[in-house]
Amino acid sequence: MALLVVKFDLKKRVKLAQTVWFMYWFAVLAGILVLSLGLFFKIELRKRSELMDNNESHFLPNVLIAMGLIACGINAFGGKVCYDSLDPTKFAKWKPMLKTFLVFCVGFNALLIVTSLLCFIMRIPLQFTLAEGLKNGMKYYKDTDTPGRCYMKRTLDLMQMEFRCCGNDNYRDWFEIQWVSNRYLDFSAKEVKDRIGSNVDGQYLMDGVPFSCCNPSSPRPCIQYQMTNNSAHYSYDHYTEELNVWRRGCRDALLSYYGGIMNTIGALVLLVTMLEVTISCLLTVFIQSIHIVLQNCFLSEISDTLKRTANLSLSLFCFLSVSLSSTHTYTHTHTVMGTNRQLLVFPSDLMSRLM
Amino acid sequence: MALLKMKFSQQRRVRLAQGLWLLSWLAVMCGAFIFCLGVYLKIELLRRDEVMEDTDIHAVPNLLMLVGLASIGANWVASRVCQDSLDASRFPRWKVLLLGWYAVAVLLCCLLLAVVVLSYALQGRLEESLKVGLRNGIRFYKDTDVPGRCFQKETIDRLQMEFRCCGNNNFKDWFEIQWVSNRYLDFTSQEVKDRIRSNVDGRYLLDGVPFSCCNPASPRPCLQNQLTDSRAHYNYEYQSEELNLYSRGCRQALTDYYMGLMNSTGPGVLSVILIQLSVLLSMRYLQTAVDGAMALESPEGESEGYILEKDVKATYAEVKAKALDLLKFAQVDPASEVAGAEEGEKAAEASAKAATTAA
């Protein structure tokens, strides 16, 4: 029993062919868009790869670039087929390939759905990479004379100024590490000797932050040193002082920045997927209308493949959404409680949930 | 002897009309580009409005926007003329307009040239305006509690960080003014009292700079205070320290930025002038060729196209004669006036005599 029967005369067929051809070229542009999004994301990751310890995974942008290229190829081929379709002599050479082409299209659409879901999910590994990378970055802030790390100070300073953040979770992270290089410390001074003697590792710790943490919106000149000592500065109370330094942590800032990029890319890829699915449906209708090959078994083959792909994508989607929601609750507890322990429980708990 | 005469067959006329149609649409795009360039420049200038004293430099983007809009209009008209040019019934109504159109096109090219010249000529005014604006900005840096000036601190800080500059000419400008507000000074402390007494105006001056002057590329954490005292910091030499703060002054940085912007638009503007001139010349050829064709017995035949009907000297003499004629028509000729007055008097006398004899 055919679905949604429509009668086609020559004029309608020509109109349909033109529409599908036009939509294919539009889809080529969409493929170029996906490609450029992948390139943009790759470049953004490279720009800050120093802050992620050079450990960041380029899996997602590579997938986007590949999908963009394949989309361009498939859609250009489809456009060519449509262009030739109304001329029987030219169309004869495309006839045998059509079945496989349609199957390819369906498979490609499924892959696109998976890609867009990936965009929303890859936020989680990025969070871990960022946390690790920023912690190390702050440790190497003072090593401006060590080859390979001499630009870490500049990178961190520029990042803190650009993203309006300070430290990993907040500005107190700077109190826990030595960020002044030993070359600039006068070891004969009493103050330096006291500070070094005050902790086990012999580090020069101070309750001060680098200048890049300063907030320009503050009404008073920036207070960077002796921040916890109210008597060191006139009319200063460090508990109520809000505008002096940036209050946000850089991990949050960077994560929301990259999260925003990934959400946008995911939404755009979903739109492209919908466009591709529409085109595939139209192409199926068009091919039917010129009475090619389509015996019932071909139709039922197509509908079977579609059903299977739909089931697969649906189950994949359910799995991914469950894992996403569970990790979301776990990361939420993590930020609230400030420990990493919960996250280690995640994989085994998820497995028990699924079973 | 016509200037730059060319023969145009029907085929060539059609090709010329098509080519000119495309060229005029390209010129419309260029006009839109010039308009967007003007808008972009204006926005960039307005963003730093707070550190500029006067707005003379705004003439450049204003002119660009005006020329852009006029160019879009003129070139759209040109494309319509092209569309109608091969149709003998519709072309004559455009003929009247064309002389005016040529004048407008030449005016647009001159204005674009003027923009390029202005952008170099106004550099001095821009620097002066920035000098005064920045001096005020630095003076009012501490007034974060005065309405109308409370954002000066944020503006100057962000400016120094973005353009990587410090002070007006260099960082020493900060030593000469009080940039710490009195609200945050402990007047009972000896150090504050000393500093206030050390100068005539009773200002709290120090050899320090705000944090926004700090250079992130420096290998050591930023030194902001007691900059002239080499003993106040370990391993620090005031005379030879280069990377600690930004060495450039903000006036120089901003001037360089704006001059760079305007210079980079120079080639674009020049190419738009070339395109506009080529539209103008092609339109003249099309007009003369179509006019020539319409005057022939067989409109499909060959006609001549030229830029000027006679050569330059003859055309100039003709235009001069026409202009003088117009002037003569406006001016009343004294000799003919006297003769006319005499005749009028005689006629009046004659009629008066006739009236008395009749009575």
Image (cartoon, helix red, strand yellow):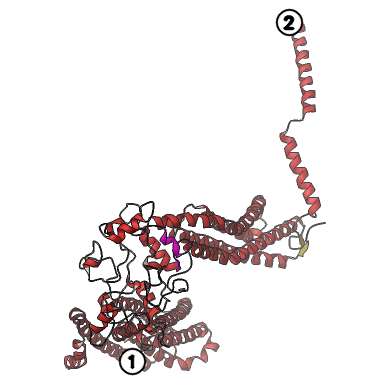
- In the image, residue B298 sits, relative to residue A298, either above or below, namely above
Q: Are marks 1 and 2 on the same chain?
A: no
x, y percent for residue B245: 43, 70
Check residue B171 for magenta coloring: yes
Q: Residue furthest top?
A: B359
Residue at image mark 1: A305
Q: Is residue B82 visible?
A: yes
| SS assignment for the magenta stretch, majority | loop
> Residue A198, how many percent across, how many down?
22, 82
Residue A325: name its quadrant.
bottom left
Q: Residue at x 35, y 74 (%)?
A: A160
- Which label sits on residue B68? none
Q: Relative to B314, is A57 above or below?
A: below
Q: Nearer the viewer, residue B102 or B37?
A: B37
Residue A310 falls left or right of residue A75: left
Identify the secondary structure beneath mark 2: loop
Give the amino acid at mark 2: Ala
Q: Is residue A303 left or right of residue A73?
A: left
Q: Chain of mark 1?
A: A
Q: Report helix, strand or loop for mark 1.
A: helix
Total numbered badges shown on the rendered structure: 2
Let me know if residue B150 appears in the view: no
Of B187 and A229, nearer the camera is B187
Q: The N terminus of chain A appears in which quarter of the rendering?
A: bottom left
Q: Percent x, y for residue A332?
A: 20, 80
- The residues colored magenta run B163-180
**Amino acid type, label 1:** Thr
Q: Residue at x 32, y 69 (%)?
A: A214
Q: Which mark, residue B359? A: 2
Residue A239: % across, % down: 20, 68
